[in-house]
Image (cartoon, rainbow, N blue to C red):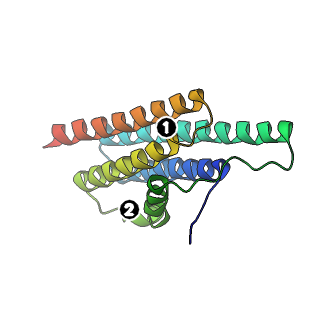
Amino acid sequence: MDVEFNAVEILEIAERIEQNGADFYQKAADIFDDTDISRTLLRLAEWESKHESIFSNMRRQILESVKKTDANKSFGENLSDAQVMAGLAVFGIRPEPGDVLSGRENEADIIRVAIEREKDSIVFYTGLKGFAHSEENIQIINSIIEEELEHIRILNRFRGQRD
């Protein structure tokens, strides 16, 4: 059975991914008394919240465009690309951020999980790019992918400082 999603649904999933990322980083920051790691994790949470807002705006633009053109028109072509579906599967089986963190994790645990989540996000957004409806949206997604890569670099630098 083929499962298909339209652009609005995909962007809703992207918003949820970013919200989960922000929640994860916020909860992770709360675990540590060390201000360096807490500050870094809080900054990453802020970036994820910003990404959520960007995807929300993109989704609203699509909905407004549909309202202006034809009330009966679909919210964009249905999406069934294997890479996007793989990304959705990864996030569909992921537990909520609060369920991942017990509060007993050490810095290495947090950084490892955070890097895994960032890499999964990049896979999802790379697939999402193929369905962007404009060059502007492709550039926005590319920018978010670059920021997710920067998150990985920040986490790796932080890990290197602690080793």
Q: Is residue 4 visible?
A: yes
Residue for badge 1:
46
Secondary structure state at the residue bearing disc 1: helix
Report the amino acid beneath label 2. Answer: Leu
User: Foreground residue, 9 or 130?
Assistant: 130
Q: Residue at x 49, y 37 (%)?
A: 46
Residue for badge 2:
101
Q: Is residue 29 visible?
A: no
Going from N to C along the chain, the mark reached first, 2 or 1, is: 1
User: Foreground residue, 18 or 24?
Assistant: 18
Q: Is residue 32 above or below residue 62?
A: below
Question: If the image is split into quadrants, where does the N terminus sit?
Answer: bottom right
The residues bearing labels 2 and 1 have C-alpha atoms spaced at a distance of: 19 Å
Does the CB distance between marks 2 and 1 fall below 8 Å?
no
Q: Residue at x 54, y 36 (%)?
A: 50
Query: 106 left or right of 151?
Result: left
Secondary structure state at the residue bearing disc 2: loop
Q: Residue at x 58, y 32 (%)?
A: 137
Find residue 64 and report its image quarter: top right
Find residue 161 and report its image quarter: top left
Q: Is residue 98 above or below residue 69?
A: below
Query: 7 left or right of 141?
Result: right
Q: Residue at x 39, y 64 (%)?
A: 100
Label 2 packing within 10 angstroms: few (<14), some (14-19), many (20+): some
Question: If the image is split into quadrants, where does the C terminus sit?
Answer: top left
Label 1 packing within 10 angstroms: few (<14), some (14-19), many (20+): some
Whole-percent x, y for residue 96 in the image? 48, 63
Whole-percent x, y for residue 78 in the image? 64, 53
Q: Is residue 129 above or below residue 103?
A: above
Whole-percent x, y for residue 115 in the image? 31, 48
Report the amino acid beneath label 1. Answer: Glu
